Amino acid sequence: EACGNTVRNITGSELAGVDVNEPFDVSPYAHGLFQYLLRNPICQEMGRKFKISFSSSDEDTALSYLHDLGFIPKIKDGQKGFKIMFGGGLGSQPAHAELLSEFVPVNEIIPTAEGIIRIFDRYGERAKRMKARMKFLIKEMGRDVFLDLVEKEKKAIAFETYEIDTTAFDGPIPEPLLEVPQVTIEDTKAYEAWKKSNVIAQKQEGYYAIGIKVLLGDFYTDKARLLADLIKNYGANELRFSLRQNIVIRHIKEANLPFFYQELAKLDFVHLGYNSTADITACPGTDTCNLGIASSTGIAEELEKVLNAEYPQYLNNQEIEIKISGCMNACGQHNMSAIGFQGMSINSGKLVAPALQVLLGGGRLGNGAGRFADKVIKIPSRRGPDALRTILNDFDANANGEKFLNYYDLKGEKYFYEILKPFADVTNLTEADFIDWGNADNYVKAVGVGECAGVVIDLVATLLLEAKDKLTFAQESFDEGKWSDAIYHAYAGFVNGAKALLLAENEKTNNHAGIVDLFDTVFTSTSKIELSTTFRDLVYQ
C-alpha cells in the first residue's frame, strides 16, 4: 500500500538478483510476501503503518535494522532461509530492530510475518498516534512476551508453511528486441569516470547494472517514457528504483555500455556519484510536506554543488552517506547517516531563521546491525555548506586512513561540536540567513497535519455499520472456503461492535485487546449483556 495504517510497499535491495554477494535472489520472496499481504484483511486497519524490507546480502543495503520486519538471506545446511529482524524504526525516536531469528526457512516467512502483524494489530496503540508503531509495543511488552504471543497466534493461521512461487524470476536474461548500435565515445575520460562511478558488475558474467543518479529523486514523465523505450528496445526491459531515490538498469552487456552512456547522456542521466557521498538523499521538506520545518531539497542541492565542485574524490566514496530531513520525522533518514541534517528553526531576537540540526556518526554496519547518529549542534541553514566543508576538511586532514565512523568515534561528539560551534552563533546573522534555501521570501515557520495521518472516525453508528460489513465479509469468506479470512473478519466484527457499545457508555481504550477486556468489565461481568462465556473467550476461540 502507498499510504494509510497498513503494510506499506515492501522494499528490497535494488541489486537483488544480480548482487555478486547474495546467497540467492530475494526478489521472489519479497514479491510473494507483497502479493500475500496486499488487501489482506489482517492488515487493512492497523493502528499504524508497518514497513518490511528484504536485503540481498549481509551488507544489508535494505536496512533491516530500521524496519518493522527486515529479512537478510542465509543458507543453512543447503536450505534457503532468512535472518529476521523486527521492531525497528526511525522517526523522532529511532529504535534498532531486535533479532527474531538467525534462520527461518523460506516457506515459513509468510506465517511468521502474519503472526507478527496479527499481534501488532491486536495489541498496538490506537489512541496516541505518535506511540503507535510496533517498536513502542515491543518496548512496552518486552521482546519475549511479544514473541510468545506471536507463537500462540500462529496456531490460528491456516498453514504452518507457505511455498512461494519463484518461477517468474527464473529463466535466462532476455535479449534486446533491437540490435544495439555500436557507437564511438568522443569524451573517453568522461565515459571512464562514469563507468567507475555508476556501472556495477553483476553476478551474471559479462553483464552489468547501470546506476542512474536521479537528482532529489525527481523523475519526470517525459524522461520516464524515453527511458522505458530505451530499456525495452535495447536492454532486458527491467529497471528498479532504489531506497536512495535512484534508478538501476540491469542486464546490460559490456559491449553495449557505450551506447547506453550515449543515450542516457541525452536524458541528463549520467551524473557521477551513484550511491556516493555526493548522492544526497532528501525528503520533500517544505516544498510539499505539511510537516516540513525547513527546506531539505534546497540545502541538498547546495551541498551537492559543493561536493561536485570542491570534493571530486567523494564521487566514488560509498562509505559516507549524507541524508537530509525537513523535520524530526526522519523521512530522509537523516538520523541513521554518517552526516545528517534535520530541518529546524532558530531564534534571533524577535526573528526566526531556518536552521539545521547537524548529526554525525550514524551508519549501516551490516547483517542486521546499524547505529544512529548523534545530534551535534544546531546552525542556521545558510551555514550548512560551510559546516560540511569543515567536517570533510577535518576528516581529510586528520583521519590518516581511518574510516569516517571510526574517526568520529576516535574524536568524539564534543570534538565536532567545538569545530562547528562558530557556525551556531546567531548574533551576526545577515538578511540572507532569514531566507531558506530555494526560497526568495523571508522564512516563516508553519507546520500542518501530515498527509499520512490515517484519519479514524469514532462514531457509534459508523462502527456498527462497519461491524455489520465485517460479519458479511466473514460469511462470504466462509462460503468461499477462505477459513482464515473468515475468522479474521468475524474477529474484526466483534471488535468494532464492542467498541461502538463501549463508546456509547463513554468508555475508551487504546487497542483491540483492551476493547475485548473492557467489554467484559463493563458488560459481561455486570450482566448488562448476557453471554454464555466471557467475551474474550468468544472472540479468541
Image (cartoon, helix red, strand yellow):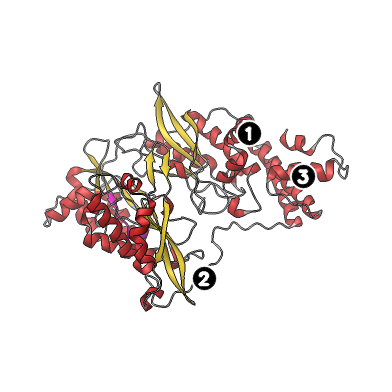
* 419 w.r.t. 83: above or below: below
Residue for badge 3: 518
Horizontal and vertical percent for residue 236? 29, 44
Of the numbered discs in the image, which one, if any, rests on residue 321? none
Task: Kindly identify the residue that appears in the image at 49 percent across and 49 percent down.
Answer: 94
Instruction: Write the start and end of the magenta stretch as one range.
Output: 211-216
Task: Kindly identify the residue that appears in the image at 28 percent across and 60 percent down.
Answer: 389
**In the rendered structure, which amino acid carries the disc numbered 3?**
Leu
Q: Is residue 268 visible?
A: no
Quadrant that contains the C terminus = top right
Residue for badge 1: 149
Of the numbered discs in the image, which one, if any, rests on residue 446? 2
Task: Kindly identify the residue that appears in the image at 35 percent across and 31 percent down.
Answer: 23
Count of marks, rendered view: 3
Give the alpha-carbon distance from disc 3 to disc 2, as whole Å: 40 Å
Give the alpha-carbon distance from disc 2 to disc 1, as whole Å: 43 Å
Quick one: 18 or 181, which is closer to the camera? 18
**In the rendered structure, which amino acid carries the disc numbered 1?**
Leu
The answer to which image quadrant residue 137 occupies is top right
Name the secondary structure under disc 1: helix
Name the secondary structure under disc 3: helix
Give the alpha-carbon distance from disc 3 to disc 1, as whole Å: 20 Å
Whichever of callouts 3 and 1 sits on the residue coming sooner in the sequence is 1
* 375 w.r.t. 287: above or below: above
